[in-house]
Amino acid sequence: MLFNTLRYAEFFAAVFVGSWALVRIAGVWPRLVFLLLVSYGFYAAWDWRYLPLIFASSTVDFLLARAIARETRPRARRAMLIATVALNLGFLGFFKYWNFAIENVAALRALLTGEPASVGHAFRVLLPPVGISFFTFESMSYVIDVYRGELPPHKSYLRYLLFVAFFPHLVAGPIVRPRDLLPQFERAPSLTPQQGGEGLFLIAIGLVKKVVLSDQLALNLVDRVFERPENYSALEVLAGVYGYAAQIYCDFSGYTDIAIGSALLLGVRFPKNFDAPYKARNLADFWRRWHISLSTWLRDYLYIPLGGNRGSELATYRNLMITMLLGGLWHGASWNFVFWGFLHGLGLAVTRAFQRAVQRRGGGRGERGEDREAAARPSPLRFPLHALGVLLTFHYVCLAWIFFRVPSFSQAVLILRQIGTLTTFHPNLPPVLVALLGVALASHYVPERLYERVRAGFIAAPAPVQGALLFLVAIGLHEAASAAAVPFVYFQF
């Protein structure tokens, strides 16, 4: 049930009316039961066979967290924590990475024996559960937080099941922390006109990003260039790479906007997941802006437990690399994703090394008052250096996106070789397509104050004006929509 379909609009309208009617008629508890049932129904619409999996994993984690909180013996607590991590990663590993593992074993055996590499269909997992990467991370983080003493075990089994299965974030995030969502299910829900206006605004913006920008760039530029790069000039292939950077941002941030807006209309607020990532001045800044819920999860539950930056510089670089390699593998069972993670790990390590070198070069400067005042004064080089940092970071991210998008390393090499031809003819770049690409990328540089003024203006507008604006958006979406709804990119993860 894709967010960009009429079917989802009908489903959400029924859920919206039903949930708020239940609050008025019967109270909070029946509403929670209703939301849990429709969330399970939403998941079953993808593949009902995996519904017991999400229910069972949620139940086991809920019980193990309570057992960990009661237990006082360190070894027993650690054993139960290992059990929940093994269970969640076991589910994730089997359903998502089993085929990848057996294919690599078969390839290695073929290399050693000279026999053809083949894997029988009987040994394959046909279709991994949708959203398993997201709900396993959410449920696992709850048990880890309880083990660390950062969160008390939740008393309500029903609310915990709803936390894991709540449909707006279930299949593609954001990865919502239990400390952010569970308390909201404990309070009586409310929906103010401001919340309603904000939710509608976000859904409209998300659909425009997805249907008008992402889908059109994918269908008319990105998919064609990445499928047969040899048929295009260097300029067109480069535009295709830029187009993919714009496509994946508009696609995933558009999904997140719809998810956040849908949750807001149900009285629930999700955390922000994107913050104009392509205006990052370095790679560390990029990961503070891109898929924030995943990057902070990897930081808190992988990078810091590995040692973070508490050890030597070499250990810190190792921890960065491990975190990003596993972050790449989280995205998909392919060596392309692992290499994408390697590129980002390498870039983060180089960024950190450069920053440390600059600090050492400065010695103790900045300690005296006059040095601090000098540092605070604007430098004529500050803006050019900042712009250069943004430009270099964007192009490094685009280089990594090539390996994220292609099905094989040979295809990535073909794309890079074609760019290296430096040919500039561009019959496949009509002005409308260039304009779409420009709007998708330039949206990062719209002043935050201007965006907030537009958002606040829509929220403050009378309901008839909001309705008229949404009607105009709906017409635009209808005109831009392709014959069939295009799935969101991150649904595959």
Image (tube, rainbow, N blue to C red):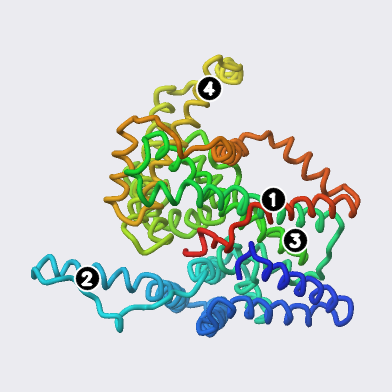
| Mark positioned earlier in the residue sequence (4 or 1) | 1
In the rendered image, residue 167, in percent from the top left (x then y), is placed at 64, 71
Which numbered dot is residue 366?
4
Quadrant location of the N terminus? bottom right
Residue positioned 31% across, 68% down in the render: 100
Tell me the crowding category of disc 2: few under 14, some 14 to 19, or many 20 or more residues within 10 angstroms, Cα based.
Answer: some
Distance CA(mark 1)–CA(mark 3): 14 Å
In the rendered image, residue 169, in percent from the top left (x then y), is placed at 62, 65
Disc 2 on helix, strand or loop?
Answer: helix
Q: What residue is pinned by disc 1?
A: 205
Task: Give the side of residue 468 with respect to residue 63, left or right.
Answer: right
Distance CA(mark 4)–CA(mark 1): 44 Å
Question: What type is the residue that disc 4 sits on?
Answer: Gly
Residue positioned 30% across, 80% down in the render: 121
Disc 4 on helix, strand or loop?
Answer: loop
Q: What residue is pinned by disc 3?
A: 264
| Mark positioned earlier in the residue sequence (4 or 2) | 2
In the rendered image, residue 252, in percent from the top left (x then y), is placed at 56, 54
Are the residues tagged 2 and 3 within 8 Å (C-beta)?
no
Disc 1 on helix, strand or loop?
Answer: helix
Question: What type is the residue that disc 3 sits on?
Answer: Leu
